[in-house]
Amino acid sequence: MVSTAFVFAVLALLLAPGPTNTLMGLAGAHGGLSRVVRLIPAELAGYATAILPLSFLGAQLFQTMPGFELVLKVAAAIWIAVLAIKLWTSLAPDDGAKEISARQVYITTCLNPKALVFSLVLLPSAQTADFWPYFALFAAMVIGVALVWGGLGVMTQVSAAGTRRLMIIQRVASAWLMFVSLSLVVNIIQA
């Protein structure tokens, strides 16, 4: 895959709404862009934790342990559902928002189904010399997309109606995460 095609494919997948992007948007809405910047290392670590082992061992691992992919999908579905429930219940209209933690971003990113696509489809084979430059380019795109989603979250704070708008956005994000979780469950059942 040429670099341009790689960039467009990665950006298309990274920019798509998902659990990590939802958390980064909420972090921007609750804590501003400085909070998002502090969470970027957790997102990068989460992707590295998921992608590197899968890139080096993924195909062999799935062949020798066919149930491993199912375990990853079930864990992701459960974690995303837990996040959705926490988000739904953590902000009452007259309550302060609970801060999105680095731990939440890390675990969510580790379990993000996008990591499977990045490691097994989009990134070059880990045994080639191209792997590390492409991985570095991927990491740079992760940073950029996190800032975009965080910036979108920051834009929700602009008016005096920020708290009410924040609650609505958090509830919509919670509903979206529950939809993602249920989609994973449906995918598991249909497989």
Image (cartoon, rainbow, N blue to C red):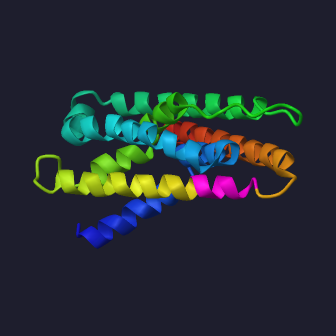
Please say if 63 is above or below 31.
Answer: above
**Which residue is at a point 50% across and 40% down the rendered structure image?**
38
Which quarter of the picture shows residue 129? bottom left
Question: At which x and y percent is residue 25?
Answer: 62, 49
Q: Is residue 80 magenta?
A: no
Q: Please state if 125 lies on the left or on the right of 34 as rendered.
A: left
Q: Please state if 8 lies on the left or on the right of 176 as rendered.
A: left
Would you say residue 183 is visible in this rendering? no
Q: Please state if 175 lies on the left or on the right of 95 as rendered.
A: left
Question: At which x and y percent is residue 150?
Answer: 59, 52
Main SS category, magenta section: helix
Q: Residue furthest front?
A: 34
The range drawn in magenta is: 150-157
Question: At which x and y percent is residue 101?
Answer: 57, 31
Question: At which x and y percent is residue 90?
Answer: 75, 29
- Pick whichever, 33 or 81, lies toward us: 33
**Which residue is at a point 38% across and 44% down the rendered structure image?**
115
Would you say residue 101 is visible in this rendering? yes
Q: How many marks?
A: 0
- Pick whichever, 170 or 17, lies toward us: 170
**Which residue is at a point 48% across and 31% down the rendered structure image?**
107
**Which residue is at a point 51% across and 28% down the rendered structure image?**
103
In what quadrant of the picture does the N terminus appear? bottom left
